[in-house]
Image: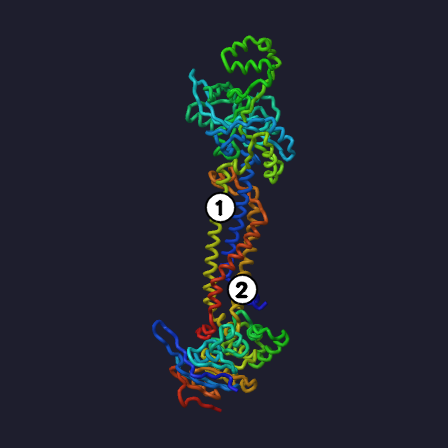
């Protein structure tokens, strides 16, 4: 079963009198459990495509299906609920909540869900803290962590609700290359263990090489013949 | 719980800015408490001062009057009250009444001799029964002589003569400045009054000078005459009763010339025993100021007294009788309310703008929360919680400071510019009186206004989309 499917998705914006075409008819199917990179230069439409997957943007034309449900016609409240239960986000700038510590940041999405008991939450949070190797940092605030550690917290936070898909927009852009590679390796290991679908955007060719499948995008279009599976 | 935790930690994280905003809100809250206490104290002191110094709790006046009673309406004196003894009887039998003072306001001319010539001086006065007036009003601080021979401590008794005039120091200085006449206590004067029949005169003497304690702006111009002298001047004195035959003859004498000759030939008139005639003071009083033991009963007692239709009277509450004084006090209070409200609105506006800046800086954080599935209502609650926490804390600080400040000022009072003080409370410092209401009002107003001031910033916050967090760099 496909986790996400885009069919002929177009997205354009109005900038004054000018129409900017971010996506110009993109079709793509991503299976559950994939570890996929969307690669392309800045402004190519990578982030816009990721936003469609993540239900934080809707297409101007075309259909978006997430976990078997068309999301392109859902309203804001429905999209919010959909994101809460099915999508995990990893941001380029980590976007940890500054007033919360490592444990609380990871617990935050579970508190929004309000579906688990305190002990279940604790068990789940601790599991992912250990997954990302931050067990000795649980009481630290974001500003007391290095960039790599912050991104590990963000990964744990994205995974804690056990979402269908984890979306990562340029997750290594604010990290040095060595840390960036370690983060990608960590994501890949978790993908192996948890079978969570990972979709990340990048323009870094070294990072791309770690993906199992790569989709190249340029000027709002998937480049023919660039979609390939890697081992 | 999550919302409160986030709100509290956000406030602590942005300590310096939040302290500044908190101080601003605390200042606004303090102003409300202090301003409201100031105005309520002013209202209370003003009411008390007016009642104690020139109206009493209410005023009785003639039903024939077309005007409202005013202790300062010297140009248009009220009609005389009839039935004064009966009114006094009703008041004496009303246990809630603590004291009453009949009096009249009028104007005349004082005539004194200087260098063999007569000098005439303008003279505005209250004609009073000194003992009953002193029982109700104690505004005159004597600077020379005495107040109609009354004991200053008890306002009763005394062996000095009770007849004469008492003038204000200001009036005395006005005579010196404008007329070149320096009056001394004990000096004989002639009072010239204008009556329907022409000008009448009564001899008297200056028995004291005073300085008003309150409302100098009006009482500097008001002097006093004892009522017996006033009655003599305006012929309010008569004979209590005459033998029936004389009464008829007197009545006929007023009708025709033969009636006059008839009176002369009346044996009863010729044999009248003058020693046995009783003098009666006819009423020249225009107002009776009434003091109650408990002011809160004023409305009920006014109705009770007014219900005596046979007395042919009207009653007016202190506010009506105080004319423009109560209005000026209310006006000043309104102004203070308005100024306080305006300052608080400015505080609310600054608060709102700071919140918007705060939200703009937190676009990333809000967008992230929204991306993770936080609903708009969650964001809204988070900001409202921040506002309520901050403003409650600021209000509590303001309340403590205001409590200390008001308690410290207390009866010593706040010095006011003399003109304002005279109109607002009759003069002197304004004592500040602690009461719960301004504190509760301030807390409620602060919280309501701050929540309202949060509405627009919250709208801005909830309009932030997850997309903005994704695109935030």
Q: Residue furthest bottom?
A: A231
Residue B302's quadrant in the figure?
top right
Q: The disc numbered 1 marks a residue on which chain?
A: B
Residue B429 showing in the rendered view = yes
Vertical position of residue B44 compared to residue A65: above or below: above
Q: Which mark is residue A31?
A: none
Q: Is residue A70 above or below residue B205?
A: below
Count of numbered circles in the view? 2
Looking at the image, which residue is at 59% across and 67% down?
B1
Q: Which residue is mark 1?
A: B334
Residue B282 falls in image quadrant: top right
Question: Mark 2 — residue?
Answer: B12
Local packing at callout 2 (Cα closer than 10 Å; few below 14, some 14-19, many 20+) is: some
User: Helix, strand, or loop for circle 1?
Assistant: helix
Asked which quadrant contains residue B9, the reply is bottom right
Q: Residue furthest left?
A: A17
Q: Nearer the viewer, residue B19 or A15?
A: A15
B199 to the left or right of B438: left
Query: Considering only vertical position in the picture, is B264 above or below A47?
Result: above
Residue B232, x across and y down, in percent: 53, 20
């Amino acid at each position: 079963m496909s986790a996400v499917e885009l069919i002929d998705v177009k997205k354009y914006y109005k900038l004054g009198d000018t129409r900017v075409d971010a996506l110009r008819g993109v079709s793509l199917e991503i299976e559950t459990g994939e570890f996929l990179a969307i690669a392309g230069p800045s402004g190519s439409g990578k982030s816009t495509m990721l936003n469609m997957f993540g239900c934080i943007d809707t297409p101007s034309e075309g259909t978006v299906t997430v976990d078997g449900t068309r999301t392109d016609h859902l309203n804001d409240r429905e999209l919010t609920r959909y994101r809460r239960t099915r999508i995990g986000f990893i941001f380029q700038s980590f976007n940890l909540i500054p007033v919360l510590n490592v444990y609380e940041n990871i617990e935050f999405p579970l508190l929004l869900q309000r579906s688990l008991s305190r002990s279940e939450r604790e068990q789940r949070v601790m599991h992912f803290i250990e997954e990302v190797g931050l067990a000795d940092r649980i009481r630290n605030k974001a500003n007391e962590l290095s960039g790599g550690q912050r991104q590990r917290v963000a990964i744990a936070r994205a995974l804690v609700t056990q979402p269908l898909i984890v979306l990562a927009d340029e997750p290594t852009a604010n990290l040095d290359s060595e840390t960036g590679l370690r983060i990608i390796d960590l994501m890949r290991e978790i993908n192996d263990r948890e079978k969570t679908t990972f979709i990340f955007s990048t323009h870094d060719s070294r990072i791309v090489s770690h993906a199992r499948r790569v989709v190249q995008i340029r000027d709002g279009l998937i480049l023919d013949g660039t979609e390939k599976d890697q081992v | 719980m999550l919302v409160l935790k986030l709100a509290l930690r956000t406030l602590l994280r942005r300590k310096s800015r939040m302290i500044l905003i908190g101080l601003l809100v605390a200042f606004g809250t303090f102003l409300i408490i202090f301003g409201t206490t100031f105005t309520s104290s002013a209202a209370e002191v003003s009411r008390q001062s007016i009642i104690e110094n020139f109206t009493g709790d209410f005023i009785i006046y003639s039903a024939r009057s077309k005007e409202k009673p005013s202790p300062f309406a010297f140009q248009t004196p009220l009609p005389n009250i009839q039935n004064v003894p009966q009114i006094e009887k009703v008041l004496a039998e009303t246990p809630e009444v603590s004291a009453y003072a009949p009096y009249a306001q009028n104007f005349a001319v004082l005539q004194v001799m200087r260098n063999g010539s007569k000098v005439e001086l303008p003279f505005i006065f209250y004609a009073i029964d000194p003992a009953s007036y002193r029982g109700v009003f104690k505004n005159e601080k004597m600077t020379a002589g005495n107040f109609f021979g009354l004991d200053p401590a008890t306002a009763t008794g005394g062996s000095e003569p009770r007849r004469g005039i008492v003038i204000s120091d200001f009036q005395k200085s006005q005579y010196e400045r404008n007329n070149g006449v320096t009056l001394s206590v004990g000096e004989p004067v002639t009072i010239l009054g204008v009556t329907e029949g022409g000008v009448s005169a009564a001899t008297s003497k200056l028995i004291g000078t005073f300085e008003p304690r309150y409302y100098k702006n009006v009482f500097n111009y008001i002097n006093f005459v004892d009522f017996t002298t006033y009655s003599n001047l305006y012929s309010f004195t008569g004979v209590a009763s005459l033998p029936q035959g004389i009464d008829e003859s007197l009545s006929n004498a007023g009708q025709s010339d033969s009636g006059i000759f008839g009176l002369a030939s009346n044996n009863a008139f010729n044999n009248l025993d003058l020693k046995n005639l009783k003098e009666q003071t006819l009423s020249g009083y225009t107002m009776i100021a009434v003091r109650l033991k408990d002011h809160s009963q004023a409305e009920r007692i006014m109705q009770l007294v007014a219900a005596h239709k046979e007395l042919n009277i009207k009653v007016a509450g202190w506010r009506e009788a105080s004319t423009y004084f109560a209005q000026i006090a209310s006006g000043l209070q309104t102004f203070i309310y308005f100024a306080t409200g305006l300052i608080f609105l400015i505080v609310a506006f600054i608060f709102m703008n700071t919140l918007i800046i705060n939200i703009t800086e937190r676009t990333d954080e809000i967008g992230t929360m929204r991306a993770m599935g936080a609903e708009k209502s969650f964001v809204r609650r988070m900001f409202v919680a921040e506002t309520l926490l901050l403003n409650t804390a600021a209000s509590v600080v303001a309340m403590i400071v205001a409590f200390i400040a008001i308690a410290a000022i207390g009866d010593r009072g706040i010095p006011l510019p003399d003109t304002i003080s005279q109109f607002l409370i009759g003069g002197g410092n304004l004592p500040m009186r602690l009461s719960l209401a301004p504190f509760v009002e301030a807390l409620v107003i602060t919280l309501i206004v701050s929540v309202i001031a949060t509405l627009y910033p919250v709208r801005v916050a909830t309009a932030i989309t997850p997309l903005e967090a994704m695109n935030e760099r």
